[in-house]
Image (cartoon, rainbow, N blue to C red):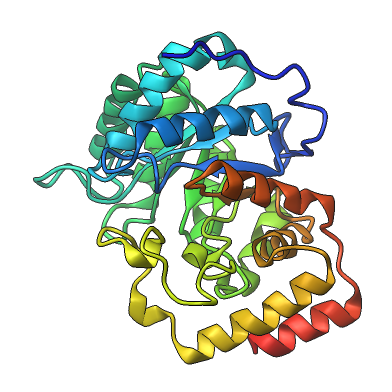
Amino acid sequence: MFKYSASPTRYSNMIYNRCGNSGLMLPAVSLGLWHNFGDVDDPAIYKRILCRAFDLGITHFDLANNYGPPPGSAEINFGEMFKKQFSGYRDQMIISTKAGYTMWEGPYGDWGSKKYLISSLDQSLVRMELEYVDIFYSHRPDPNTPIEETMGALDLIVRQGKALYVGLSNYNPEQTTKAVAELKRLGTPCLIHQPKYSMFERTPEKGLLDVLEKEQIGCIPFSPLAQGLLTNKYLKGIPKESRAGKPHGFLKENQITPVVLDKITRLNAIAEKRGQTLAQMALAWILKDKRITTVLIGASSINQLEDSVACLKNTTFETHELNLINDILG
């Protein structure tokens, strides 16, 4: 096993943004471990990706209890890598995890009860061999658990020292407003919100981003490349190693329709004129909004990681470019 030593220039090219009304700065690009870091993946590849990400100035690594597959394996694999290579850099890293989706059988391994959230984080800390995480999220709202109980669990977790900050994910504007008010009442403010947001999924524009701006809460969109659709990967078919080509991937082959391919092709033409790849332009399009703190990328290779981070070279758009993009997206 190689011994990792971080690049001394790792902070020189990354952009860091303040997260909401807090003292925390996050890199404009963060690395998510939803895919590519489970037991079905190649350790030699994902270990190199983690090291290269840190060398590029990515200090934020985002996990959840059920990431894998199998569920929990991404946390175990990250924890092993952290212990062997990153332990000396703990105070320079932001590590987050979540609970809210099904993790274990029975009535206590899902949703948003205090029982589940507390137990899940305890398990996550064991898997990652950490004393605390920097951010702990309620991964989704629970229609059958009072918001006071779910937010009370987040408050308790911070007071127990198991997390420094708390966040929400997949909450709509109304749910976010109620959750934020309860966290304020308890004295543990909401730091950040993680919604699904991309050129192909613009629901956060229908009120959520306005709520986050009003409440001074950070925003970290996930799936900004629409599971890889907003790349040049599928312009000439479906590669075997792509998400659509894998049996355990979330992107299915039938989602790559002629209409989608036409949009991707036209967007790619705009990106080429901007001197960017389609992925770079899609990430820059997210980051152009000052309400966005950081964008959450995935990576299955060093090249993909470096390509994504290069989006920071140009995150501004001319009005005519935005008009063309909106015409294509409809």
- Place of residue 264 in the rendered image (x, y in percent of width and height, measured from the top left): 60, 79
Splitting the image into 4 quarters, where does residue 141 fall? bottom left
- Place of residue 301 in the rendered image (x, y in percent of width and height, measured from the top left): 51, 45
In this rendering, is residue 41 above or below 264? above
Most foreground residue, 125 or 108: 125
Asked if one can make out residue 210 in the rendered structure from this viewpoint, the answer is: no
Asked if one can make out residue 301 in the rendered structure from this viewpoint, the answer is: yes
On the rendered structure, is 312 left or right of 38? right
On the rendered structure, is 145 left or right of 269? left
Most foreground residue, 58 or 218: 58
Most foreground residue, 15 or 132: 15
- Place of residue 35 in the rendered image (x, y in percent of width and height, measured from the top left): 40, 48
Residue drawn at the location 61% of the way across and 13% of the way down:
5
Quadrant where the image shows the C terminus? bottom right
Quadrant where the image shows the N terminus? top left
Splitting the image into 4 quarters, where does residue 16 fall? top right
On the rendered structure, is 202 left or right of 84? right
Residue drawn at the location 31% of the way across and 27% of the way down:
76
In this rendering, is residue 309 above or below 212? above
- Place of residue 54 in the rendered image (x, y in percent of width and height, measured from the top left): 62, 28
